[in-house]
Amino acid sequence: MAEYKIMTGNEALTHGAIAAGMRFFAGYPITPATEIAELSSELLPKVDGTYMQMEDELAAAAAILGASAAGKKAMTATSGPGFTLMHENVGYGMATEIPCVVVDVMRQGPCQGVATLPAQGDFMAVKWAAHGDHPVIAIAPSSVAETYTEIIRAFNLSEKYRTPVFFVSDATLAHMSEKIRIPDASELEIVERPQPTCDPDEYLPFNMEDNGIVPMANFGSGYRWFASGLIHDDTGFPVKTGNTVAIEGASRHLLGKIEDNIEDIQKWEEYKCDDAEILILSVGLVSRSVKTAIDAAREEGIKVGLFRPITLWPFPGKRFAELTAKAKTVMTCEMNLGQLSEIAAQYTDRDQKIVAITQSDGTVIQAKKILNAIKEAK
Amino acid sequence: MAKNHYELRFSGTGGQGMMLMGDVLAQAAGISGGKEIVLLKSYGPEARGGACRSELITDEDAIGYPALVEPDFVLAMSQLACDSYTGDMNKENGILLVDSDLVPNVPADVKHVYRMRITEIAKEVTGRPITANVVALGAISVLVPGFTPEGVKAAVLGKLAPKLHEMNIKAFDAGVAAAEALK
């Protein structure tokens, strides 16, 4: 039976992850993500799962890839400073196409920043969390309820497309409590990892040709495969340096498997966009302040709407462009000094007005400030 | 900005049970009352003695900006809390409830102030000052629109171990009676 509960964002994230099938968590505590580790350590043993406290974030990212390669759905959770340390192994996960979920509960940065206060300064950090051309799926919820449902989607996308998936929350969303509906297990769509059925001697762990996604054999199951971070071919072994066709093919494969499935991966919300002359782009918790401001502005007759990517990356640019084409003014609202505003500029005409509402003081932007900006932009 | 929107703040010092008050009223409003809620907690590094508060928003509709803008109700269980956390409240229509032994000075511009010897009442009826927050919950269930003594009492008992029920029922009922006398 579905039931209603009151819980924090971090609690909802952990319960959702376990509902999605997470059976391994490795991490290193950091504010404001620590409660995810804490609750995982309590809940995982009850479902025959494993919690590992690691010596640092490098090891945490390595451990979840190892656990995933051995067949467990795995996650780690951290904040900006720890996320930076994970970049190397996240890139390894992308190259070897090992599913996992990496949670970044954003706090004010850069470096240690302000440990306890929220921010949205990691939008671009999650996009570019590994060097080289690499696939990125990142999801950003705006409520505790959505944290629960979207972390499940994060696991599902990770399994479907054999790639690490990022999940970006923030300190306020992590620690505030809201009412959420916990669905019955039978209501949930959970993607389970398929296993190869071919003769183990004939198993190829990759398919570079058609952006294919081959079932990833569990380590130790009798199917041997080589998980190399070097550019490799279908066998998993590095390609020869002179084989330019194979090198390019392998690079394009990683991005191609995301691009081929972009409609399945992208998700967004449109709030009062139908007749919007002012279109606001906002992501995550702060988008709720935007909604409050939009409701107030509409009472004064201002036609304004919100476009909110739930899948932040790959950015749902096609739909955003359709909406910006109808708007006179495009606004962005974010708790950083202007990361989405650069994205918005890519999808607007050169003569279209872009107004960036930015704030980086460790608080959630108030609806009043957004309303004033809307009135000025009108 | 939305209708049916109510903002509450419970402030005091660490150890007075301000966090539990938020939990109880979130449960009463959100689960039993069927409303949308946002509950926020803020405390210093001290486990005991530091300034702390929990804040609750209740609304019939989805809650946008998830923080208080103009609190409709403030409980202050210390002078420091009263001085720090009443500045932004709704002075005209908001309600300020203070423990009158701990908060001698209340802001002059708040129109609806209830002074109650919350901790003293707790000591009288249970012998335990730690039940002061439950006395306050009883009072809130009477003074604040949208709550009922039955609903809040059920939420209190739901949060506490059965062996604590008898003592806390006494505290709760005393808070209800004291608030009715003030009204």
Image (spheres, coloured by chain):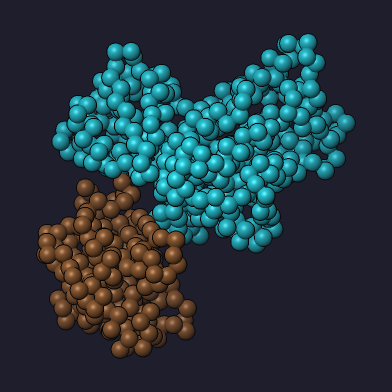
Chain colours: A cyan, B brown
Q: Residue at x 55, y 28 (%)?
A: A128
Image quarter of residue A271? top left
Asked whether residue A121 is in view, the answer is yes
Foreground pick, A317 / A330: A330
Q: Is residue A304 above or below residue B31?
A: above
Q: Is residue A148 above or below residue A240?
A: below
Image quarter of residue A279? top left
Foreground pick, A121 / A322: A121
Q: Position of residue A8 (x, y in %)?
A: 45, 55
Quarter the C terminus of chain A occupies: top left
B68 displayed left or right of A72: left
Q: Is residue A7 above or below residue B103?
A: above
Q: Residue at x 61, y 61 (%)?
A: A42
Image quarter of residue B175? bottom left
Q: Residue at x 61, y 22 (%)?
A: A133
Q: Residue at x 68, y 44 (%)?
A: A59
Asked whether residue B30 is in view, the answer is no
Q: Is residue B141 above or below residue A368?
A: below
